[in-house]
Image (cartoon, rainbow, N blue to C red):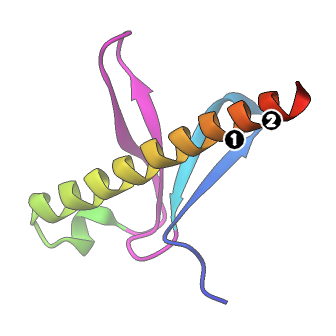
Amino acid sequence: MALPKFMIADDPVTDPDNEYIFHTEKPRFFAKRVEEDEEMAYIDIVEEIDNVEEYFHGEPEKKQELLDELEDWYFSYMEWLEEDEEDDEDDEE
């Protein structure tokens, strides 16, 4: 069985306020949504397993493409969560 390209990871015991995205393919890393203020938020790498800069050999546009793909996946995940919560609320009524 192959792992999905992106996975959600959290640690409710020692870091309950953060949710991380694990990129399972090379370059492997953990990222999270960073909120600078109420209007500015973005996805950024917070821990590397593989050296991301070295992997892209000085091609920052490729790294940005991957981060854009990860961000799209994350927002789709967030939409799915909201829909799932709405479905659960409808089932309770």
Q: Amino acid at mark 1?
A: Asp
| Magenta region includes residue 44 | yes
Question: Residue 24 location in percent, x, y?
Answer: 52, 71
Q: Is residue 3 left or right of residue 66?
A: right
Q: Residue at (61%, 52%) from the top-left corner?
A: 8
Residue 88 bears which disc, if any?
2
31 inside magenta stretch:
yes
Per the image, label 2 sits on a secondary structure element best described as helix
Task: Confirm whether residue 56 shows in the render.
Answer: yes
What residue range appears in magenta?
Answer: 24-50
In the image shown, does 47 or 17 lie closer to the viewer? 17
Instruction: Determine which residue is flagged by label 1.
Output: 84
Q: Are marks 1 and 2 in contact (CB under 8 Å)?
A: yes
Q: Amino acid at mark 2?
A: Asp
State which quarter of the image contains the C terminus: top right
Residue found at x 72% / y 33%: 85
Residue 63 rendering spot, x and y as whole percentages: 21, 60
